[in-house]
Amino acid sequence: MPRISGVDIPNEKRIEIALTYIYGIGPSKAKLLLEKSKVSADIRAKALTEEHISALNQAIRELNIPVEGELKRMVAQNIRRLGEIKSYRGLRHRDGLPVRGQRTRSNARTRKGKRKTVGGAKKKVAK
């Protein structure tokens, strides 16, 4: 398996698709990287030479594309910053609720987790 930016990419896929297995590289950035490094998009990942791999790594560095750990660290820092300044979005992240204005009365089970019943317990009345 070829290793690009510290990630093993799948052998049998076209390089254009295999690059998208790297966190931070989608289809459009993959095409841009291939143009910049002058690698054919039709070549399979297993057919990459050392020159191709080094050209792709060089293109990622030249285009300043944050990938993998660096990008995850940036996202985490942004979320932490929102929480520190006590913004609405930061508070929603902290509470594990939807951040982008979605309704929570009937949906949002993915963010809120399993349903927890609140109230509904009947009190015994002393006679």
Image (tube, helix red, strand yellow):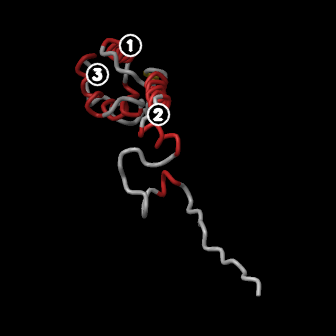
Q: Pick the residue in front: 71 or 81.
A: 81
Residue at point 42%, 35% (across, down): 87
Check disc 2 and report the residue beneath it: 86
Which of the marked residues, 2 or 3, is nearer the chain's N terminus? 3
Badge 2: how crowded within 10 Å, few (<14), some, or many (20+)? few
- Horizontally, residue 7 falls left or right of residue 66, namely right
Q: Label 1 vs label 2: CA separation?
A: 43 Å
Question: Where the C terminus falls, by quadrant?
Answer: bottom right
For residue 54, the mark is 1
Which of the marked residues, 1 or 2, is nearer the chain's N terminus? 1
Q: Pick the residue in front: 13 or 101.
A: 101
Please, which residue is most extreme toward the bottom here?
127
Badge 3: how crowded within 10 Å, few (<14), some, or many (20+)? many
Q: Pick the residue in front: 70 or 112.
A: 112
Say what secondary structure mark 1 lies in: helix
For residue 33, the mark is 3
